[in-house]
Amino acid sequence: MPVFAYRSTSLAGEVSEGVIEAADQRNAVERLKNMGLIPLSVTPPAERGFGSRMRFRATKRDLMTFTSELSTLLAAGLPLDRSLHVISEISDRRGMKEMVQALLKSVREGISFSDALQKHPDIFSRLYVNMVRAGEAGGVLDAVLERLNEFLESSKELRDHVVSAMIYPTILALTGGISIILLLTFVLPRFSVIFSELGSSLPAPTQILLSTSEFLASYGWILLIALAAAGLLFRHAVASERGRYRWDALKLLLMEDVIRKLETARFCRTLGTLLASGVSLLQALNNAKDVIGNRVIARRVEAVSKGAKEGRGISDPLSRAGVFPPMALSMIAVGEETGQLDAMLMKVAVIYEKSMRQAVKRFMSLLEPALILVMGLIIGFIVISMLLAIFSISDIPL
């Protein structure tokens, strides 16, 4: 349902501003009148400013802040509507404030909190909504939100660790590549003019280097266009389900250890959090499957839901899928036997998050020297080729 911004006044002359959900502008005006307000202006979404036309996209930090604040207020004994009102008042970002006000309005109209969240699928995932619904059903919404906040924090920490580990190799590759391109396109052409004036035959490495430099100087723009086109074709191919599956299969082949541990940690933490929050096993499995980023692993995990429906639990179908490490499968089986599956899944997640960090660290310890070695070999070849040419000058007859 569209959200309209309004400016109104009360019978006492107090001017107020806010947002209201309505089917159309006329319905929004009628609803304001029924609330005892005199509408001064009701602005449709399409007529608002550029910043408002852009759909609000909550960041992970916004979602974590909202979840943490709401959990704290509910735990302190405040009712849900009052808690949402307080959050809307203290929110700094306009988009976040409007979103919380929309949630508050839905709750005050008698809609359940989980159904109100479901109206904003771009902000609240199915996992988030289902956990809140389970918390509402069990009367432990504050505890579920606290557990959900812990889940969001651990997921963000894991993602940030991977991103931060890739920063140095990326900078190294970019600076090294730019340095080599500058040498080949701007520095070496000046030497080629000097060597051509001398008229002597140059060593083979120098001839190869100068030919490469001349090609880049003359046809570098064509190469850039070709690379851009290749990038666009790659994005188009990966956008399809078949292309994404092949790309994920290649990544799994190149970094199997890191990806398996990452997906094991994601799946187990999500499933454990959902089960601990009171979500049914089948629903939890469907949601946990959605957080798996690698299509190859996700497709194999799809059979787990079928096994659970047939009463075979999840440890046996997971072992048949052959995507998770043996130790994780053993711990999950023990959790099923002892009736503590949710707690065991969380332990598995902690173990493999730690193991994944170590695997990333090992991978980076190999990648960084490899990049330095490749850059060193290329620059070394350039330097040696130029020195050979310089030394050959002494052989020129005067």
Image: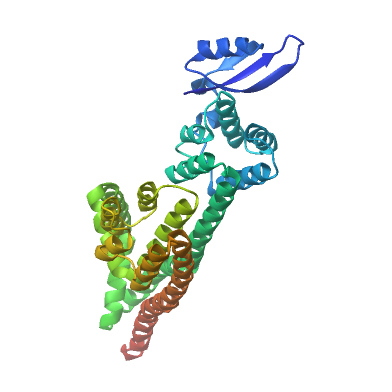
Please identify the quarter of the rendering in which residue 247 is found.
bottom left
Left or right, 216 with reference to 187: left
* In the rendered image, the vertical position of residue 89 relative to residue 72, given as above or below: above
* In the rendered image, the vertical position of residue 121 relative to residue 391, given as above or below: above
Quarter holding the C terminus is bottom left
- Residue 296, position as x, y percentages in the image: 27, 58
Please identify the quarter of the rendering in which residue 385 is found.
bottom left
- Residue 2, position as x, y percentages in the image: 48, 23
- Residue 116, position as x, y percentages in the image: 51, 32
Residue drawn at (38%, 62%) of the image: 336
- Residue 158, position as x, y percentages in the image: 49, 62
- Report whether residue 201 is seen: no
Left or right, 163 with reference to 193: right
Left or right, 365 with reference to 32: left
Residue drawn at (70%, 19%) of the image: 16
* In the rendered image, the vertical position of residue 27 relative to residue 391, given as above or below: above
Tell how many labels.
Answer: 0
Quick one: 10 or 321, which is closer to the camera? Answer: 321
Quick one: 175 or 275, which is closer to the camera? Answer: 275
Quick one: 149 or 91, which is closer to the camera? Answer: 149
Residue drawn at (43%, 61%) of the image: 339
